[in-house]
Amino acid sequence: MALSSPNRYHRRELQSALTFVLAVLITARAAPAQKIDEDHFKAAFLFNVAQFVEWPHPPLKAEIDPVVGCILGKSPLGALLEGTASRNLVGGRRFVVRRISDAQQSDGCHILFVSSSQEKHWRSVLKETAGKGVLTVGDTEGFAAQGGVVNFKREGDRIRIQINLEAAEEQNLRISSKLLSLSQIVKSAR
């Protein structure tokens, strides 16, 4: 089920989310390269990206189903994301954060952030989530090129969003052209 619909309420919500993401992107670019700013940017992106992605049926079955964001590995993003999620809705839905220790626990995840602490294991994570409609997000060099859908890539004092459209298609995910226009498109190297 898509998180966006053609009605005016959802369009306004999508515009608000896009404005928020753009503000975060501008802030992330202008801010000094500090870890805390990077973590806040990543958490804001993970929360807001749900408004720019359409998941296949049935992962979001009913209008009341929450969006589930999972964090795999050691990362401060879990706490930041939980704070944001407790105060806001995404596309009219609750956002639930789950911390998982193994890719086999990823059933039910819509968004799966694979932290850099899992660098040695992310290829098996991508294998485990293949075809399950999971938006995989990483922050390790080569993550998107090896089959992850989204990757955060540091370039100097900026964080660039990379998207692998082939990987998104394999997951049956449709990503908004608005988000694609803000991203660097990468191809699979597999």
Image (cartoon, rainbow, N blue to C red):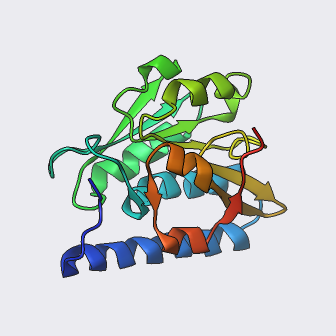
Q: Nearer the viewer, residue 26 or 5?
A: 5
Could you tell whether 18 is left or right of 60 in the image? right
Image quarter (top left, top right, bottom left or bottom right) of the C terminus: top right
- Residue 88 at x, y percent in the picture: 29, 58
- Judge whether 25 appears above or below 15 on screen: above
Image quarter for residue 41?
A: bottom right
Q: Is residue 36 visible?
A: no
Could you tell whether 92 is left or right of 172 in the image? left
Image quarter for residue 132?
A: top left
Taking the spot 67% from the left edge, 22% from the top edge, the residue there is 121
Could you tell whether 190 is left or right of 43 in the image? right
Figure disc tally: 0
Taking the spot 48% from the left edge, 52% from the top edge, the residue there is 46
- Residue 19 at x, y percent in the picture: 46, 78
Taking the spot 44% from the left edge, 28% from the top edge, the residue there is 99
Q: Is residue 11 visible?
A: yes
Residue reaching furthest right?
Answer: 156
- Residue 32 at x, y percent in the picture: 76, 65
Q: Nearer the viewer, residue 177 or 45?
A: 177
- Residue 56 at x, y percent in the picture: 34, 47
